[in-house]
Image (tube, rainbow, N blue to C red):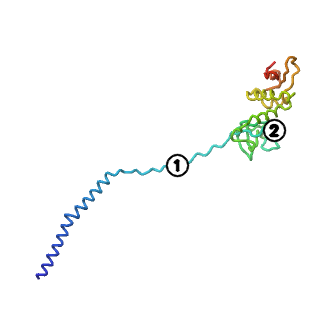
Amino acid sequence: MKKLIMVVLLLVGIGCAAGGYYIFYYKPQQDALAQEALEKSQEAPITPLDIVEEEEEAPPKAPVTDYYVSPPKLGVREMPKFDAFVESVVYRGDKLHILEKREGWGRISPYYVYEDGGPEVAEWVPMEALLEVAPTITNEERIETISHYIENSDDFKQYFDVFIKTTDSLLKDGTCTPEDFEETQGWIRSVTFNEQEAYFVYCGGLKQANKIYLDVHTGKTFYR
């Protein structure tokens, strides 16, 4: 009986010791750690979440409609085929606005019907002869192009330099067009003047008012 009492007292002592350990040491320590963790969580800055914006799709690239003539001379045809009638010509560096593309051809004018019941026609050029950027024309290329316009001028070789310079000037300022020089096949020697050696060309029409004279010795142009 005495041994039993001693065992019971021993168990009670152990229980009291364990309770004292929990109350006076373990629990205060756990409370202190919990309080420290709470304080740290309150002090830590809140990092906002990154907002991922959806990338907008790039708008479709606008189709190219403005082009430049590449060859020195290009025929403008009434239908999109090479055996069609040539309505006019355009020249290297000319800017063209393409209204429609069809099977390698570009339309540069509205449609026209010249007679009742007749076919629709327009002005067409081959797209393969066009560039998206203006061509760089060297001085040598410019001279060669102008030479084609006036190579049948009277005394062409003798007055080559003044013919080229004057023709280039008249073309650049819009006084004349390449068609004007091709119409007269270049500069024509005038037999009207006795005291000066003059040549002429018609620009913008075939009237006297359209007749431009060139004094080949001074390089000046004049009208009568």
- What is the quadrant of residue 222 in the picture? top right
| Residue 219, image quadrant | top right
In the rendering, at what x and y percent does residue 40 appear? 31, 54
Seen from the viewer's position, the closer of residues 159 and 127 is 159
Of mark 2 and mark 1, the one earlier in the sequence is: 1
Q: Residue at x 25, y 62 (%)?
A: 30
Within the image, what quadrant is residue 162 found in?
top right
- Residue 151 or 71: which is nearer the viewer? 151
Extreme residue in the bottom direction: 1
Q: How busy is the neighbourhood of tag 2: few (under 14 within 10 Å), some, or many (20 plus)?
A: some
In this view of the protein, which residue sits in the foreground, 102 or 27?
27
| Label at residue 8 | none
Question: Which residue appears at 74% of the width and 46% of the height?
Answer: 104
Return the x and y of residue 179 as percentages of the image width and height: 80, 31
Q: Residue at x 29, y 55 (%)?
A: 38
Q: Amino acid at mark 2?
A: Val
Q: What is the quadrant of the N terminus in the image?
A: bottom left
Q: Nearer the viewer, mark 2 or mark 1?
A: 1
Residue where numbered disc 2 is placed: 86
Q: Circle 1 sits in a helix, a strand or a loop, which is it?
A: loop
Q: Position of residue 155 (x, y in %)?
A: 87, 27
Q: Foreground: 73 or 123?
A: 73
Tell me which amino acid carries mark 1: Glu
> What separation in Å lies between label 2 and label 1 (alpha carbons)?
51 Å
The answer to whether the residue labelled 2 contacts the one labelled 1, judged by CB atoms less than 8 Å apart, is no
CA neighbours of label 1 inside 10 A, class few (<14), some (14 to 19), many (20+)? few
Looking at the image, is 14 positioned above or below residue 176?
below
Viewed as shown, does residue 159 lie left or right of 55?
Answer: right
Label 2: state its secondary structure: strand
Tell which residue pokes out farthest to the left in this image: 2
What residue would you read off at disc 1?
55
- Report the residue at 82% width, 25% height from top: 202
